[in-house]
Amino acid sequence: MPFEVVKQNDYLLVTLSGDCLLEAGVSVAERFRAEMEDSKLKLAVILCSDCGRMDKAFMRELVSIHQHLKSKNGKMRLVGANDQLLQMFQRNGVDQVLVNRLSLRGALADLGLAKAKEFDVNFINPFLNATVKVFKVQCFMELKPQKPRVKSGDEAPLFGDVSGIISVNSETFVGNLAISMSEKTFVAVVKKMLGETVAGITERHVDLVGELANMILGQAKLELATLGYKIDMALPSCVWGKDHQIKHFGSGRCVVLPFETPFGIICSEIMTQSTIDEAKKAA
Amino acid sequence: MKTRPIILLADDSPSIRLIIRNSLEPWIDADFLEANDGEDADRIIQEQNLLGLPVDVVVLDWMMPKLSGVGLLRKIRSTEALSLQPEVIMLTAETYPDQISACLKFRVACYLTKPFTEQDIVESMQKILLNGGYRDAV
């Protein structure tokens, strides 16, 4: 069977897999209605990331599920539909009905089951693990994680002599990842990564810190995907200057992850600037 | 007539290009070219073709200004003369399996994610060059 219906706390999760064709289509709608009546749940997520092909009959069954939910004041969202499916929905004029989201988190936010604005504490470990891994593999440095903390409003902005910054964009929020270090630490990182001895921060080498931020985000987003976040990649940027300060704007929260190295402290900061709706309004 | 392979390093980070070059040079006897973005890489590939000195392997980043690595791949693979050559090693921080699968459709020889080790890049390059007949280069 190319589908499975599992009751969650607040919604029904329908997982599609393989080719979704007519016969299965008839039974998925029947099965869904039965589960819905039984559970009294009115919200549904249709997970499509493992669905290859779908025929029109199956698509009509999904539309039928949508209509049934709507008649009960319910709602549903699709997650992870591939381009082929999205084009099919569009060709058949049902793309406004079978609304797709890139991530489970995005779908749950649409259904009012996930808070989009608050910082998710589950963010900490993926970024912590990614930072340790990136410095170990690329810089041959063992980082000792220190206690993470949430930044208070009156706390000094990010310290450092050189920082790499990259956008962290998902369906539910926009934010930034910044990694910052002192000149002494930077000199050690350049030596470890490039084998070059530099006396201080040089313009020729500052892109390294942006690249490290890029790699950390790349690694962290794999782990974040398992939590339902789908993060877009972006181009990193760098700022440098003795004791420069980075101030984050927006309504979100900021978490600081300090790491001890033999050459000084390296800090990663993750901040959710605003929800995606706020960002859209601002744009 | 060239006797050594030509390798193009296309990454917007000069430091990453230097790390790749430092990793490969002790092991691979090749001529190295560098591009700072996708458009720059496209121009170099075309110019080398016109000179009769085609690029053998591109080490290609995904996120680059002007033209992304995937944009470049799409462009060169839709060009008849470049549909098979150069070989491409993707070296990128993009880690999502669906993105990797989408990229591999453009005849990518190898997909490496950052952070990477010297062994990762050297072994991938050696394999490609041996398959391409450059036994003396590795």
Image: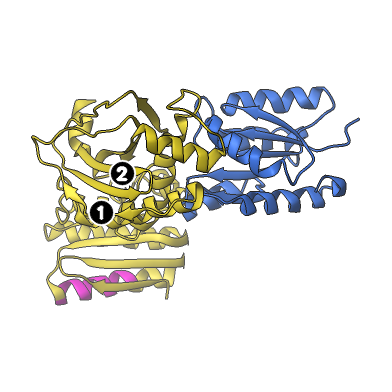
Chain letter for the yellow part: A
Q: Quadrant of residue A65?
A: bottom left
Instruction: Give the residue drawn at x 76%, y 38%.
Output: B56
Q: Are marks 1 and 2 on the same chain?
A: yes
Magenta region: A28-38
User: Label 2: which residue?
Assistant: A265
Q: By what rule are the colours in the image chosen?
A: by chain
Q: Quadrant of residue A90?
A: top left
Image-based side of B116 in relation to A161, left or right: right
- Identify which amino acid the numbered label 2 is placed on: Ile
Query: Does the CB distance between marks 1 and 2 fall below 8 Å?
Result: yes
Q: Nearer the viewer, residue B2 or A98?
A: B2
Vertical placement of residue A189 versus A29, above or below: above
User: Whole-Å distance between the Cαs marked 1 and 2?
Assistant: 10 Å
Palette colour of chain B: blue
- Identify which amino acid the numbered label 1 is placed on: Gln
Secondary structure found at label 2: strand
User: Label 1: which residue?
Assistant: A146
Instruction: Give the residue drawn at x 24%, y 29%.
Output: A246
> Residue A89: horizontal and vertical position, in percent?
39, 49
> Residue A60: horizontal and vertical position, in percent?
35, 59
Main secondary structure of the magenta stretch: helix
Chain of residue at mark 2: A
Q: Nearer the viewer, residue B136 or B87?
A: B136
Whether A29 is among the magenta residues is: yes
> Residue B119: horizontal and vertical position, in percent?
64, 54
> Residue A205: horizontal and vertical position, in percent?
49, 29
Vertical placement of residue B26 versus A201, above or below: below
**Which quarter of the rendering shows the C terminus of chain A?**
top left
Chain of residue at mark 1: A
